[in-house]
Every structure is written in structure tokens, then in C-alpha cells.
Amino acid sequence: MRNLIKTLLVVLLLSVNHAAIAGDLEDSDAAAKKGDYATALRLWEPLAEQGNAEAQYNLGVLYAYGKGVVQDYKTAVKWFTLAAEQGDAKAQYNLGLIYSYGGLTRDIITAVRKYLNDEDVTQDYTAAVKWFTLAAEQGNAKAQSELGEMYAYGQGVAQDYKTAVKWYTLAAEQGNASAQYNLGVMYHKGQGVAQDYKTAVKWFTLAAEQGDAFAQSSLGVMYYGGQGVAQDYKTAFKWFTLAAEQGVASAQSSLGVMYYVGQGVAQDYKTAVKWYTLAAEQGDAIAKEILRIEAIEFDLRERNLFIRRLKAERESIEREKWTLEDARYKTGVMYAEGKGVVQDYKTAAKWFTLAAEQGISKAQSKLGAMYADGRGVAQDFVKAHMWFNIAAIDGRSEDAVSSRDKISKEMTPAQIEKAQEAANRCIKQNFKNCD
């Protein structure tokens, strides 16, 4: 009888304790939702110290974001680790992010600078794969998507496209837009699966409909080129517009083309200039796109992820004629010819210079012509000869060769020698600071 009473007392105490913990968790969750982090912290701390995984995870969040406490990444990692070791999938996922990218903060640039120089929490792809795998195996779609990235790019594991496709597929089927986009890339490139444009379009569409800017741009490319779908300029225009409005430089450049040529939209030089200019002004397109696309809390597409995805898009599915540098050149042409804008040789020279510095031979030739004629810049035969000479190197610009030879007749031997020296110096400097 005594043993029975003891057993009943233990069960009763455990039930009361469980109810108390549940009550405290409800109260702390309610406080956090109201923004009363001090109360949430006070209620979560004792529970976390007692080993409650949910409370430990929540403390990790508070310390990671500095809510109710001084921001402390090391302490955040401590609590996430304790929760993760008990099997909490969200904590495991966040640890994966920390070790993969080095941070959880919305301030991406600060996170990168902080973590890449922080001895307490260093970037560790192997550790990231460990935690992503544990969370992914529990069905966490975000972790599955990130794990797919790690296998696709061989970070922390040997590169394995088939395994990348496996994890992308699991996440994509749960509606994860990032995974849907990346799965589309894999089908487009034929990596880990047989190349299949139609299936690529399917996944790009699902991601694009959720607002994924990269998927929208990629879908525009597919409709523009008729890959996996019937060629449809109007639909391409629609998706390029959505991506361009989110700041994707390649989509902005593509819109410039469509407005300039009149594909899928009425020909409009003025609007073409607008989009060419926006694309051209993105000298650091990666940084601009990182900062312009909204990051979602606990699903942050950090610096490395953006760089990987941008590179994948540019290398695998970007088929427009006009690249970022082409946009600069084209903007210069429109100002020089007065198409869609008031003719402005000075502004034209500015854009030709930017394109010329990227090694675009046709821009270099145009810039030479402007120096030769003194349009938008002071007339300077030496600089004109220099740019004509540089443009002639790739052998594709007969105009540059003939223009160089023609202007030589107006120059002294000393001027020609000076121009040739300037050209060699400019080439060694990768076309920068040549003026």
C-alpha cells in the first residue's frame, strides 16, 4: 500500500510539474508575442536551466537577436546547441545557418564581418552539414533546402548532385521556394537528374509564384527563349518585370532589351533607358541584390547563399543578349543617339567609359570616337588612339582598326608613341583609371 501511495504521489508531482512548465511556456510565449521580452526571458531562463528544449531554443533566439538582452552570439550558440542536442529541429537548423554563414542577424553585412572574424563562432561547413542533416531528417524543409545547397556546391561534404536533388525535392515538395528554384536549376542544367526544361519550368513557376526574384528572372528567360514552354514574350516580360522590381540586375537589363526592341510590350526607348540605367548602375550587383531582397527571419539567405545562387543563375540559365556591361554600353548608345532621352554626349561618354572599363570592345571603340570628335569629352587624339587601339585587340571591331589608322594620320610620331604606351598601361591595369 505504501509503495502504491508513493507511486501515486510521484505521478501527481510529475503531472503538476508538467502543467506548471506548460503554463510558464504559454505565459512566456504570450509575453514574447507582445514584445515583452524581459518577462519572456524571466520565465524561459529557469525552464532552460532545467533542460526544457523549447525554452533553450527560445533563449537562443533572444540572444541571437538581442531581444530583452544584450546581443550575444556565443550565448545564443550555447542555448541553440543544448536544444539541438535534445533533437529540437529548429535549433539544429539555426545552428546549421550559424556554422554555414556565420550569423542569424537581418543585418547581413554586419553578420558577415562579425562572424568571419569571430573566434567564438567560426564558419564551419562540416558542422553546418551535421546540424542541417539532423534537422532535415526530421522533415524541416528549410534545413532540407540548405542541405541541398551544401551538396550541390560541395561545402562540408563531397559535391554530390544526386543527393542535392534528393534534399531539394523533399523541401520543394513542402513548398520551400528556395528549394523549388534550385531544383529548377538542377533540371535545367541536367545536374543529378536528366536535363528536362519542362520540369525546370514547373519548379521555377512554383517558386516565382511565391515571389522568389531569382525564379521570376529565370522563368522570364525560359519564356523568352522558348525553353520548356512555347516562346511567349508577353509572359517573359511579366516575369522579368516582377524580378526587376525586386532589384535583380539581369532582369532589369532584359527589360531594357524588351522595351528597346518592342518584344512583349510596346517599343519605348524612354522606359528602356530607365531599366538599362538601373541595371548599369549596379556596379556591385551581388551586394545590391543581397541588400534589396527581403530576408525572412530564421530563413536568412545570407551572403554566401546569394552569391551561389546568383552565380548559378548567371552561368546556367542566363541567355539574354545583354549582360550588365551591355546595359552600360546600350545606355551610352541611347544617350548618344537621343533615343528615349534628350541627346546628351557627356552622359553617353560616362556610360561608354563604364562599359569600356569592363573590357567591352564596342564601348571602347565608341569612347575613342568621342575623344576623336570632342563629343561629351575634350577632344584628345592620344586618348582616342588609345581606346581605338585597345578595341582593335579582339579582332572583332574593324571600325576600331580603321578609326585608329585614320586618326594616326592626324597625329605626330610622338603622340602615337604616347598613345601606344597609354594603351599598354591601360591593359595592364585591366582598363581601369586609363584616363
Image (tube, rainbow, N blue to C red):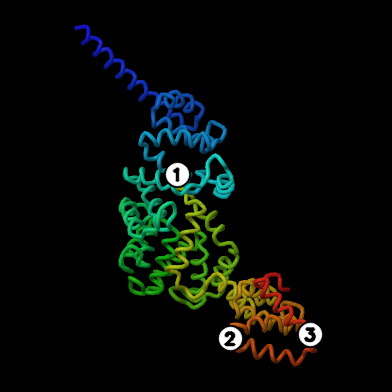
Q: Would residue 241 be found to the left or right of residue 3 on screen?
A: right
Q: Which label belongs to residue 395?
A: 2
Query: Disc 2 or 1, which lies upstream in sequence?
Result: 1
Q: Would residue 194 be found to the left or right of residue 34 on screen?
A: left
Query: Are the residues at dot 3 and dot 1 in contact (C-beta closer than 8 Å)?
Result: no
* Picture coordinates of residue 16, whole percent (x, y): 32, 18
Image quadrant for the C terminus? bottom right
Q: Amino acid at mark 2?
A: Gly
Mark 3 → mark 2, Cα distance in angstroms = 24 Å
Residue 52 visible, this orientation: yes
Q: Amino acid at mark 3?
A: Gln
Using the image, determine if residue 96 lies above or below residue 151: above
Q: In the image, which is nearer the foreground, mark 3 or mark 1? A: 3
Residue where numbered disc 1 is placed:
298
Label 3: how many Cα within 10 Å (few below 14, some 14–19, many 20+): some
Q: Amino acid at mark 1?
A: Phe
* Picture coordinates of residue 106, whole percent (x, y): 52, 46
Q: Secondary structure at mark 2?
A: loop
Q: Secondary structure at mark 3?
A: helix
Label 2: how many Cα within 10 Å (few below 14, some 14–19, many 20+): few
Residue where numbered disc 3 is placed:
415
Q: Which of the 4 image quadrants contains residue 198?
A: bottom left
